[in-house]
Amino acid sequence: MSKGFDYSKWDNIELSDDEDDVHPNIEKESWFRMKHRSRIEREEREEADKKKIQKEVSDAMPGQE
């Protein structure tokens, strides 16, 4: 039986619709830098949370690595 296509690489795609998201009182380049910085910080926070959860799970299940 054919497995088909693996679309999992598209599960966490970041869509960038920043063009329509600019406040009229904020310079566009500053807005993009702020959005980028906040996206990077969110991704780092999510990665840290993921590692913390993985550690908690592995600590709760000794001998299962």
Image (cartoon, rainbow, N blue to C red):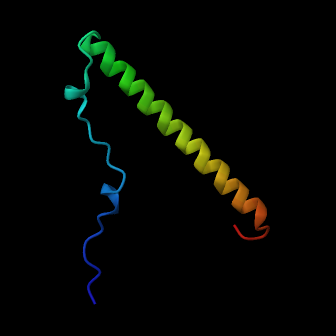
Q: Is residue 65 above or below residue 16?
A: below
Q: Quadrant of residue 35?
A: top left
In the image, residue 20 lies at what x, y percent? Answer: 20, 28
Q: Position of residue 58 (x, y in %)?
A: 72, 61
Q: Residue at x 35, y 19 (%)?
A: 33
Quadrant holding the C terminus: bottom right
Instruction: Please report the residue visible at 58 percent of the width from the left and 50 percent of the height from the top.
Output: 50
Compared with 52, 31 (above or below) is above
Q: Residue furthest front?
A: 24
Q: Which of the image's four quarters has the N terminus?
A: bottom left
Residue that extends furthest to the bottom in the rendered view of this protein: 1
Residue 26: x %, y % from top left = 29, 11
User: How many discs appear?
Assistant: 0
Q: Is residue 32 above or below residue 58?
A: above
**Side (left or right) of 12 relative to 42:** left
**Residue 7 placement (x, y as % from top left):** 29, 64
- Residue 26 lies left or right of residue 40; in this view the side is left
Q: Is residue 41 above or below residue 28?
A: below
Horizontal side of 56 relative to 10 (left or right) equals: right
Looking at the picture, tell me which residue is in the foreground, 58 or 38.
38
